[in-house]
Image: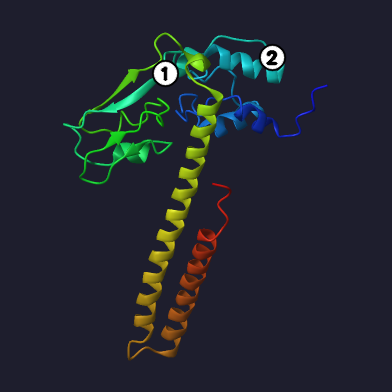
Amino acid sequence: MPQPDHRSLADQIEDLLPQTQCTKCGFDGCRPYAEAIAAGAADINQCPPGGLEGVARLAGTLGRKVIPLNPVHGFERPRPVAFIDEALCIGCTLCIQACPVDAIIGAAKHMHTIVPSLCTGCDLCVAPCPVDCIVMYPVTDERTGWNAWSGEQAAAARQRHDLRGMRLQRERAENDARLAAKALEKMKAVIAEPGNTDAEIAEKERKRAIIAAAMERARAKAAEPKGDA
């Protein structure tokens, strides 16, 4: 007898999504879309990369009828992979910032390149490119939806997406801490200036304490466990 699934409904739904993180569903990634479906705020036919098979999987889990994909969100198609014309790339890094799974390698003012095995075909790198050097090439012949993707690829894409999110969160916290440290040093210098009245010193000490508290929060946030890699 099958064992009951005790995970949240959003967790169960997320496992049925292809994890391309393309946002075509109208949400900022597969997890927000799963949560919206679970909450009744989104329908099951908004994921073009999952295709009709994806709709059928969601319908089976939710006990609903299979319905056609909503064309507002796009159409089922062979899975593409991004390709960068290296002769045109100016190294602006906008595509790197847009890629939800860190499938683009490069640095500022240096040529970028796509790692085909990591690319989910999300298209998100195309629009930001200021020199139109990125194109999407289909790589699965006539296979579309889940016939052009696998559970293993989806799991790997989800892991890269989650790791990227944790990295960005850590970098933001570290940057906040650096800014707060600079502000604290500046405030200390102001307090030490000769000629300050007691009231002025007290006010500056109060502001220094606020900055110090903000620094401590930033340090604590940066030190929070980031989950399993």
Q: Earlier in the sequence, mark 2 or mark 1?
A: 2
| In the depicted structure, whether residue 99 falls above or below residue 59 | below
Binning the other alpha carbons within 10 Å of mark 2 as few (below 14), some (14 to 19) or many (20 upward) gives few
The reply to whether residue 39 is visible in this rendering is no
Measured as percent of width and height from the top left, residue 223 is found at 53, 61
Q: Which is more foreground, mark 2 or mark 1?
A: 1
Measured as percent of width and height from the top left, residue 99 is found at 38, 36
SS for dot 1: loop
Specify the quadrant of the image occupied by residue 118.
top left
- Mark 2–mark 1 Cα distance, whole angstroms, equals 27 Å
Binning the other alpha carbons within 10 Å of mark 1 as few (below 14), some (14 to 19) or many (20 upward) gives many
Residue 138 horizontal side relative to residue 34, left or right: left
Q: How many labels sit on residues?
A: 2
Residue in the image at 56% along x and 33% along y: 32
Q: Which numbered tag is attached to residue 64? A: 2
The residue that mark 1 highlights is 79
| In the depicted structure, whether residue 171 falls above or below residue 204 | above
Q: Which numbered tag is attached to residue 150? A: none
Residue 16 horizontal side relative to residue 106, left or right: right
| In the depicted structure, whether residue 157 falls above or below residue 44 | below
Task: Say which quadrant the N terminus sits in.
Answer: top right
Residue in the image at 44% along x and 16% along y: 74
Q: Give the amino acid type for the residue marked by disc 2 in the picture.
A: Arg
